[in-house]
Image (spheres, rainbow, N blue to C red):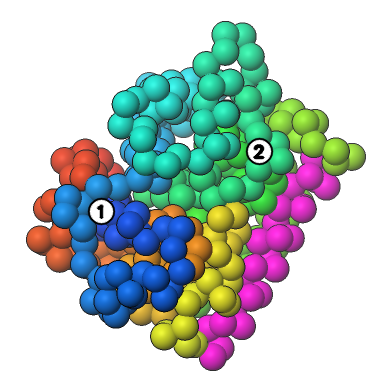
Amino acid sequence: MTTLLTKRAATGALVGLALGDALGYPTEFHSVSSITDRFGPWRGLQLPTPALVTDDTQMTLALARGLRTAMDRGVLGPEGMVEPVRQEFIAWNRSPENNRAPGNTCLRACDLLERPGLPWQDASQIDSKGCGANMRVAPVGLVPGLSEEQRAGAAQLQSALTHGHPTALAASDLTAHAVRLLAEGAEPAGLVALLRSYALENRSHYHERWLGDLWTRSQDPTPEHFITRGWDECLGILDRLQDALRSPSPETDPCLATGAGWIAEEALATGLLSFLLFVDEPVTALRRAACTSGDSDSIACLAGAFAGAHLGADAWPGEWADRIEYQSELATLGALWDA
């Protein structure tokens, strides 16, 4: 089994998600035919110049900085994590660089997170399961030394600060778990089965220590009922993903099999499908994810995180990795967590 240290999984995942994000930035909101009309065959998609990213990478870095601050202060827990991550999200929201078509849920929630005295649970958009929560969660899967409870709680908490829908929480947890499994050397061929088992194990487990009374903002009668809704939607999309992998069709838009990716569980599944179609061809996986009819930058961002966690830093062409926006911070964080 390749170790995290020798393959530099954290660096690979962080650079990969940024590359996918930049590759999908110009293709988002376009049909596959209009993408190929403009850029040529999808297998030839090239990293734009300059290689600018979107809010997906910006918020990933915000979360990463918040986690680093929290863990510098002691053992990671909900009390120590909320404030640094909240402050990073507010800083991102205020930043003049936040001009890359950010999601409305993130903008609304971040505005509310800034209100003095307002519990973060009241800022959370309880009905939103947009992909904005799991597109940024990879750092939770890459930080070393966390218990399974810490990793799951942190993944769901970072989602809940903006996207409070139970499916957003479950999809974020699954995304972080997938990144961790791949970083630790899990075989991609067995990944969907591992994720399905994890979902079933956690199906009725509400992380009250991390989420507090978030569930009471919904119409659910109990916290278990609340969180089970989210896991069941994720189990449904994992079934669709498994079906797609039984008869893989690399030349077909992955969104047709597992959804357009605007919502959390579809972004997870379509990002995974793009990666699993080309396990040993990470750049091809990014190109396939970016040439899709859905939320191309988020799908490719997730595909890049999975591929980079699996193959490590050497997965990416040096010429691409060297000129991706925020390259220095991505490399610094990657080196910190790889060490």
Magenta-colored segment: predominant secondary structure: helix
Compare residues 53 and 144 and report the one nearer the observer: 53
Identity of the residue drawn at 36% across and 33% down: 98
Q: Is residue 241 above or below residue 171?
A: below
Residue 109 falls in image quadrant:
top right
Which residues, given as a range, are shown in magenta? Answer: 223-247
Residue 279 falls in image quadrant:
bottom left
Tell whether 193 sits left or right of 97: right
**Mark number, residue 275:** none
Residue 50 in view, yes or no: yes
Please tell me how crowded label 2 is: few (under 14), some (14-19), or many (20+) other residues with Cα within 10 Å: many
Identity of the residue drawn at 53% across and 71% down: 255
- Asked if the stretch drawn in magenta spans residue 227, the answer is yes
Q: Amino acid at mark 1?
A: Val
Tell whether 105 sits left or right of 10: right
Q: Is residue 96 above or below residue 117?
A: below
Q: Is residue 331 above or below residue 188?
A: above
Give the mark nearer the N terminus: 2 vs 1.
1
Q: Secondary structure at mark 1?
A: helix
Identity of the residue drawn at 68% across and 23% down: 122
CA gap, disc 2 and disc 1? 28 Å
Q: Secondary structure at mark 2?
A: loop
Where residue 154 appears, as percent x and y from the top left, is 52, 39
Q: Amino acid at mark 2?
A: Gly
| Residue that numbered label 2 is attached to | 164
| Residue that numbered label 1 is attached to | 15
- Asked if the stretch drawn in magenta spans residue 166, the answer is no
Identity of the residue drawn at 37% across and 61% down: 27
